[in-house]
Amino acid sequence: MSLIYFGLEFHYTRHMNRFLQAIYLTLCVLSLSIEGGSTLEKEPLMSEQYRKLTEEEEYIIIHKGTERPFSGEYTEHFEEGFYVCKRCDTPLYRSEHKFPSHCGWPSFDDEIKGAVHRQTDSDGRRVEIVCAKCRGHLGHVFEGEYFTQKNIRHCVNSLSMRFISK
Ligand SMILES: [Zn+2]
């Protein structure tokens, strides 16, 4: 600070003014990038409040993998209850939304309002579905197959969910 004061008193020229502006701008950019870093740490995918996942679950939920067909524990599961997000426990589907599609993965023709977020898949064709709260990968949604009257199929990985009986 005393150096800057010294500079201001004895060499206060336009040149020095620009120099100080440059320092000020550099400090602004630095503080912005520090703020940016802390925002990234708060990304939903990094939250410590979420359930710790196994390697297999992490592959599906975070890296958007797909479990092998007919391998999941909920594919042919029709008990009464609801299915919550494996990672953040948000209720996603009710048992009445589930139907036997015989496609190899749990299938639902509806969702709990606001629980499931749709976005274009990285393949640019399919519609990916993620948990609206933690953005964990669930699967894909298909329309126009006429499996049920609602004409929609949420094709969800069993590993993305946890079943809670009524
Ligand atoms: Zn979630």
Image: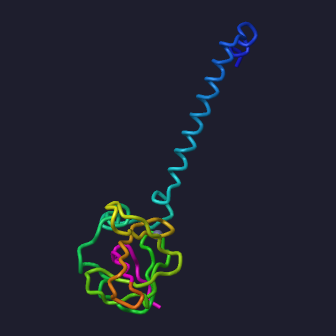
Q: Position of residue 160 (x, y in %)?
A: 37, 73
- Magenta residues, start to end: 152-166
Asked if the magenta segment contains residue 165, the reply would be: yes
Q: What residue is rendered at 61% in x and 30% in y?
A: 27
Residue furthest top as drawn: 10
In the rendered structure, the answer to whether residue 68 lies left or right of residue 81 reads left
For residue 96, above or below residue 144: below
Q: Quadrant of residue 106?
A: bottom left
Residue 21 x %, y %: 65, 23
Q: Is residue 32 left or right of residue 105?
A: right
Instruction: Identify which residue is drawn at 33% across, 75% down.
Output: 157
On screen, residue 89 versus residue 3, left or right, reads left
Residue 145 within the segment the image draws in magenta: no
In the picture as drawn, the residue positioned furthest to the right comes out as 9
Residue 123 sits in which quadrant? bottom left
Up the image or down, 40 lies above or below 13; here it is: below
| Side of 73 where 35 appears, left or right | right
Secondary structure mostly seen in magenta is strand
* Residue nearest the observer in this picture, 159 or 141: 141
Question: Which image quarter holds the N terminus?
Answer: top right
Q: Between residues 40 and 145, which one lies in front from this camera angle?
A: 145
- Residue 96, horizontal then vertical, whole percent: 43, 91
Residues 37 and 105: in front is 105
